[in-house]
Amino acid sequence: MSDDAKTAPGGQPQTTPPVTIAWSQYRGPAKVAFANAKPVVVQEAANGAAVYSGRASTTATFSEPGEYVLHVTANDWSGEGGRGFQCCWTNGEVKVTVSTTSAAYTDRFITVNGLKLHYLDWGNDSKPPFIMLHGISRVAHQFDHLAPYFKDDYHVIAIDMRGHGDSEWSPEGAYLVEDYVKDLEAFVDKLDLHGLTLLGNSTGGRVVQVYAGLHPDRVARLISEDVGPERTTDIASAFTRQVEQEKNGWASEDELIASLKRSNAKTPEEILRAYAHYGSKRREDGRIVWKRDPNLAKGFIPTELWQYVSKIKCLTIYILGGNSRIVPAETQQKLKAIIPGVQIVVIPETGHYPDQEASAEFLRIAKAFLSGTRP
């Protein structure tokens, strides 16, 4: 989509993006859920006379097969509804036929190290593999708002790590970073993947750092989101308290979402709803609880991984949240000293999950890094 990015005569430039879009269901036999109903428009090169041109992607999940019509509205700087000035927006409708085999991704399972792991395969398996690993207590659907932006150029795979989501729990409660790494090693070997691009946030970021250090011949590029080689006692203790506080769950999914909104005020509601929907389950007593092994906390201990990180040879970037203290300045300096050519980029005013709080900026930085240019 393109726009001239001009304001009305005499008007002041707006601080909002020049172009925004919003998706909704117009008609259909059942419900449609969008991974992000208002996906960010990632700016690209100007198109003709337009001074702003970009692309936005999202994923729609249809609860039943049938004929659907989706509605999309594109707004310019005047905002939704033109701020009462009847300018300027455009509407579109998209007809979609959903069969029982239609899906943006495929749910798959693989057995590694005696555990059945669930993963999302976004297709395009002729392209280089791009594996995404979530953080502690999160799930593979964590990346539903990101994967569509990469699936044309990569074979995107998002994994539910052991003890999370629809993957099996470790009977021994083995949840150290090294245990997750062993699963990733077996996963990659079993699927015979090479030339990997790895993205991990939080605990998943620690896993991909260790893997890249152990297997420099398998990894082409590494993206670590707001996590370095160290986990402090304070961080480990905080998760232990969280597991204890949340053990009784919530009365409904809506109650869970309300709780998430209070603690993640900058994250779009659509992303939180997807997290709550795919990351939780109904317990026998009717309460909604997270799809996670309570024993995760036993492996979430103070950790130091410099011995592995010091061996990283691939192109590497750390994308950090400006309000986060997970990777302090001294750690950043040490990373610059030991990883050749490492890039460290901080997204201001974001916390531990900048990909959710500032998706457009995160995508811009990640895409620039993957294309070989500095963000």
Image (tube, grey):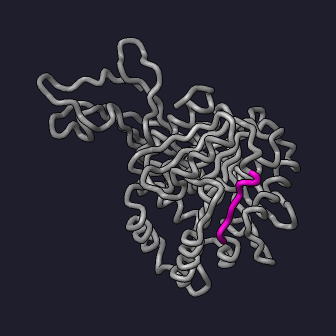
Judging depth in this view, the residue of 338 and 18 nearest the camera is 338
Furthest residue toward bottom: 285
In this picture, is 295 found above or below 156? below
| Residue 48 left/right relative to 206 | left
Q: Quadrant of residue 372?
A: top right
- Residue 115 image offset from top left, x and y in percent: 82, 66
Q: Quadrant of residue 284?
A: bottom right
Residue at 63% from the left image edge and 37% from the top image edge: 342
| Residue 332 left/right relative to 123 | left
* First to last magenta residue range: 301-308
- Residue 137 image offset from top left, x and y in percent: 60, 67
For the question of whether residue 4 can be seen, the reply is yes
In this picture, is 320 found above or below 314? below
In this picture, is 299 found above or below 352? below
- Residue 160 image offset from top left, x and y in percent: 69, 60
For the question of whether residue 287 can be seen, the reply is no
In magenta stretch: residue 307: yes
In magenta stretch: residue 347: no
Residue at 55% from the left image edge and 51% from the top image edge: 330
Furthest residue toward left: 10
Q: Quadrant of residue 288?
A: bottom right
- Residue 182 image offset from top left, x and y in percent: 82, 59
In this picture, is 95 found above or below 37? above
Judging depth in this view, the residue of 179 and 29 nearest the camera is 179
Q: How many marks?
A: 0
| Residue 226 left/right relative to 16 | right
Residue at 44% from the left image edge and 46% from the top image edge: 358
Is the N terminus in the top left, top right, bottom left or bottom right quadrant? top left
| Residue 18 left/right relative to 110 | left
